[in-house]
Image (cartoon, helix red, strand yellow):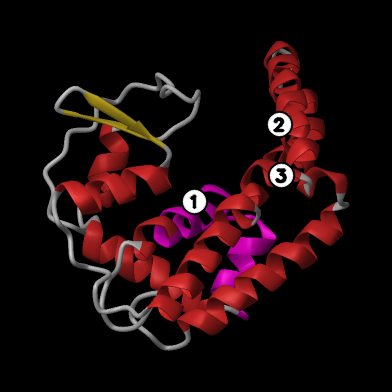
């Protein structure tokens, strides 16, 4: 996106804030995507946002924060509240040895539940979460319109965050309400994800095999 050379270590070691992502550059460690992007813009004198006025930057920032603080939580919510309830009866019936793995998964599920409850989305029913996330995807769809990128026909740093989060919802939970909306009512989001995937990661499948 910004033509900066980088190396992915392939490690799942958490950053200094106990989260991912984080980067290391010339001995300096920077954690959290917002701070990473701000750091890289200053360090490499990137001008990809210079054409935006203050109002446009405010709108883009507000949209990005909504997606980051709420919409993306549909991913762990789907795994904690929807997916495991769909999988459990079939797996226990067809593979009794799966029981131990399922106990581990339930423990992880409890951790996800705690995170979701603390964030707030976990306090709603599955149907209510679908409504909330649907409205937020609708807002993104309206902002995107027929534009090539989030803020028009020129790529900005905001596309990094929006693409990352929408690609996660689109590809990691394909049997979910968000994916169905991105393929249906808000198909311009699905088109946006596939378009940026092709532009930024033409070797997508190869990278997944390496990962």
> Where, by quadrant of the figure, is residue 207 drawn?
top left
Query: Of callouts 3 and 2, which one flags the residue occurring earlier in the amino acid sequence?
Result: 3
Q: Residue at x 65, y 54 (%)?
A: 70
Q: Residue at x 72, y 11 (%)?
A: 100
Residue 92 point in image, percent of width and height: 78, 24
How would you rate the neighbour count of disc 2 (Cα within 10 Å): few for under 14, some for 14-19, many for 20 or more? some
Does the magenta stretch mainly form a helix, a strand or a loop? helix
Residue 180 point in image, percent of width and height: 63, 67
Q: Which residue is mark 2?
A: 112
Query: Of callouts 1 and 3, which one flags the residue occurring earlier in the amino acid sequence?
Result: 3
Check if mark 3's residue and mark 2's residue have beta carbons within 8 Å.
yes
Q: Which residues are magenta?
A: 162-185
Which element type, helix, strand or loop, lies under badge 3? helix
Residue 208 point in image, percent of width and height: 32, 40
Q: Is residue 124 left or right of residue 74?
A: right
Image quarter of the C terminus:
top left
Q: Is residue 35 left or right of residue 206?
A: right
Which element type, helix, strand or loop, lies under badge 1? helix
170 inside magenta stretch: yes
How would you rate the neighbour count of disc 1 (Cα within 10 Å): few for under 14, some for 14-19, many for 20 or more? some
Q: Is the residue 2 above or below the residue 20 in the image?
A: below
Q: Which residue is mark 3?
A: 77
Residue 75 point in image, percent of width and height: 62, 47
Image quarter of the N terminus:
bottom left
């Amino acid at each position: 996106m910004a033509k900066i050379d980088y190396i992915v270590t392939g490690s799942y070691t958490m950053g200094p804030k106990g989260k991912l992502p984080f980067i290391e550059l010339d001995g300096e460690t920077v954690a959290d995507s917002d701070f990473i992007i701000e750091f890289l813009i200053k360090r490499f004198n990137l001008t990809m946002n210079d054409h935006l006025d203050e109002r446009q930057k405010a709108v883009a920032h507000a949209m990005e924060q909504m997606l980051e603080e709420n919409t993306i939580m549909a991913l762990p919510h789907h795994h904690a509240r929807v997916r495991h309830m769909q999988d459990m009866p079939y797996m226990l019936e067809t593979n009794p040895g799966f029981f131990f793995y399922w106990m581990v998964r339930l423990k992880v599920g409890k951790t996800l539940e705690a995170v979701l409850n603390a964030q707030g989305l976990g306090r709603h029913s599955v149907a209510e979460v679908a409504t909330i996330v649907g409205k937020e995807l609708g807002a993104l769809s309206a902002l995107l319109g027929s534009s090539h990128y989030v803020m028009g026909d020129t790529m900005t740093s905001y596309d990094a965050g929006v693409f990352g989060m929408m690609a996660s919802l689109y590809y990691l939970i394909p049997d979910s309400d968000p994916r169905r909306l991105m393929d249906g009512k808000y198909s311009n989001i699905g088109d946006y994800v596939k378009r940026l995937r092709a532009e930024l990661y033409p070797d997508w499948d190869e990278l997944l095999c390496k990962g």
